[in-house]
Image (cartoon, grey):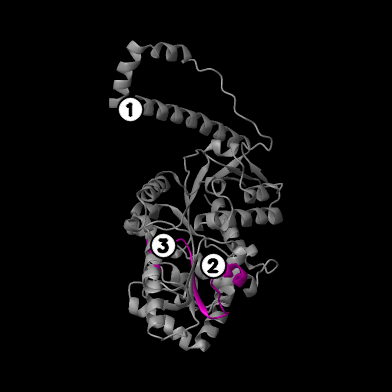
């Protein structure tokens, strides 16, 4: 069976860790696993990568996509290695443009444009017409290449009948907790859910929790075929070939006047956004430190992009107010860094702290367990599904609970060791190979 994948979220990202959102990691991980599966078991099948935003293909392509296209079974629709600059001929309206430039006509039109936004309306009309033509060309190419399923993306989706339409639903946090998101994100997800309800024959939810949320949200989803397709840990993330040592990490931190010791710091890594509950982490650690309830050489390391909701600014302000002296400041805050640095920070951390209020899955929990690091995480949404019996759970709305659990795991190193071993075992339940086979079997039933 030939499949087409919409990959706009991959094209618009650079492939660096900072651009690797959960959506990026899931999309790329699933694609990579599907390609390997097809090479091994169905070499005659083809996978076509495409984007509904054709203009994106005129830019430099994310090198990680080009790695996928190096496979014989994979094709990037509309991409040319040779730079081709699109040539446009003069518009058939050019004579009218000259007439409209006459002052006696131009000024009244400007007034009308100001009132009715004529240019914006015309621009939208042209864009719609151009997209309609491009979508028709795509459909023709897909039919010609015997494509049976079109796998829509997180940011670009459009019905591609008569092919079957499939989409991944990551979470419903924009529906249940809209205040935790930007307005444009809520609007996009609202349109995506409407599209899934109306046009998709198949839906892949990344956890049982997300599937249950979907069925709670709308009874119409009960009529849809829904598969739970868990993320796995990328093999490259587990690869030891390029691992950095603690010395390498401290060389990097020395430029910021900081250093860490093995098993002497907590770690949080993810985008700084409201639902991640980062202010609770910072406040709980600060109180434990000030109350001398944890060792004085213990640190709190937080890694992630600025995100939204001014969370990073609030964290910075709190730390500056309470720990103005660099020597007594136990916090280390970093922007996104490469996978190699993240892996080294995870491996050397005493525990990863992840008290998120809501998750569709929770990749940092799985990645940390796969590297043998104990995890403190929330007992809500999908996180118990991911962490199983191998995590120390907290109520994300109970500040005292988080504070006590952070102290408890430091005071009980035997618990940390047991969680480390249990986490390694738990993480093996989630593999991309298993998910790829499940997805392929699911697509065959549509």
Mark 1 or 2: in front is 2
Q: Earlier in the sequence, mark 3 or mark 2?
A: 2
Mark 3 or 1: in front is 3
Query: Which residue is at the front of the view, 362 or 292?
Result: 292
Q: CA distance from mark 1 to mark 2?
A: 51 Å
Vertical position of residue 168 compared to residue 406: above or below? above
Q: Earlier in the sequence, mark 3 or mark 1?
A: 1
Q: State the residue at coordinates (32%, 57%).
A: 179
Query: Which residue is at the front of the view, 280 or 296?
Result: 296
Task: Name the residue beneath numbered marker 1.
Answer: 117
Q: State the residue at coordinates (55%, 46%).
A: 7
Describe the element under mark 3 as helix, strand or loop. Answer: helix
Describe the element under mark 2 as helix, strand or loop. Answer: loop
Residue extent of the magenta highlight: 249-278
Please give left or right for residue 24 compared with residue 315 in the image: right
Task: Name the residue beneath numbered marker 2.
Answer: 256
Task: Name the residue beneath numbered marker 3.
Answer: 312
Mark 2 is surrounded, within 10 Å at the Cα level, by few (under 14), some (14 to 19) or many (20 or more) other residues, namely: few
- Residue 305: assigned label: none
The answer, for residue 31, to whether it is visible in the render is yes
Q: State the residue at coordinates (40%, 44%).
A: 198
- Find out whether the residues at labels 3 and 2 contact each other: C-beta distance under 8 Å: no
At which x and y percent is residue 296? 47, 84
Q: CA distance from mark 3 to mark 2?
A: 18 Å
Q: Earlier in the sequence, mark 1 or mark 2?
A: 1
Mark 1 is surrounded, within 10 Å at the Cα level, by few (under 14), some (14 to 19) or many (20 or more) other residues, namely: few
Vertical position of residue 425 compared to residue 19: above or below? below
In magenta stretch: residue 6 = no
């Amino acid at each position: 069976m030939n499949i087409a994948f919409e990959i706009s979220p991959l094209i618009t990202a650079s492939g660096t860790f900072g651009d690797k959102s959960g959506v990026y990691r899931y999309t790329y991980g699933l694609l990579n696993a599907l390609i390997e599966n097809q090479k091994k078991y169905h070499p005659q099948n083809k996978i076509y990568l495409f984007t509904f935003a054709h203009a994106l293909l005129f830019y430099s392509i994310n090198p990680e996509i080009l790695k996928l296209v190096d496979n014989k079974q994979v094709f990037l629709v509309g991409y040319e290695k040779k730079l081709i600059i699109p040539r446009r001929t003069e518009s058939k309206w050019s004579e009218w443009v000259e007439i409209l430039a006459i002052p006696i006509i131009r000024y009244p039109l400007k007034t009308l444009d100001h009132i009715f936004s004529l240019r914006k309306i015309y621009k939208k009309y042209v864009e719609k017409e151009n997209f309609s033509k491009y979508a028709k060309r795509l459909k023709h190419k897909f039919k010609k290449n015997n494509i049976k399923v079109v796998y829509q993306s997180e940011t670009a989706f459009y019905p591609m009948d008569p092919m079957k339409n499939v989409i991944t639903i990551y979470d419903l946090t924009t529906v249940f907790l809209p205040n935790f998101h930007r307005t444009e994100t809520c609007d996009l997800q609202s349109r995506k859910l409407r599209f899934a309800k109306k046009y998709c024959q198949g839906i892949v939810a990344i956890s049982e929790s997300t599937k249950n949320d979907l069925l709670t949200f709308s009874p119409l989803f009960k009529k849809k075929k829904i598969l739970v397709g868990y993320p796995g840990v990328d093999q490259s993330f587990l690869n030891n070939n390029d691992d950095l040592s603690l010395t390498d990490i401290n060389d990097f931190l020395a430029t910021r006047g900081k250093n860490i010791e093995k098993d002497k710091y907590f770690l949080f890594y993810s985008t700084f956004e409201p639902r991640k509950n980062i202010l609770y982490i910072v406040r709980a650690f600060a109180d434990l430190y000030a109350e001398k309830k944890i060792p004085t050489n213990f640190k709190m390391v937080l890694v992630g992009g600025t995100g939204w909701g001014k969370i990073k600014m609030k964290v910075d302000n709190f730390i500056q107010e309470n720990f103005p002296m660099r020597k007594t400041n136990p916090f280390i805050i970093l922007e996104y860094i490469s996978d190699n640095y993240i892996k080294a920070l995870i491996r050397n951390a005493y525990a990863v702290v992840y008290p998120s209020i809501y998750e569709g899955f929770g990749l940092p929990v799985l990645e940390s367990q796969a590297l043998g690091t104990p995890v403190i995480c929330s007992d809500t949404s999908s996180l118990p599904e991911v962490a199983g019996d191998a995590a120390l759970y907290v109520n994300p709305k109970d500040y005292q609970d988080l504070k006590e659990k952070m102290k408890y795991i430091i005071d009980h190193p035997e618990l940390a060791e047991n969680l480390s071993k249990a986490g390694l075992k738990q993480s093996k339940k989630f593999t991309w190979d298993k998910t790829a086979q499940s997805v392929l079997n699911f697509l065959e039933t549509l």
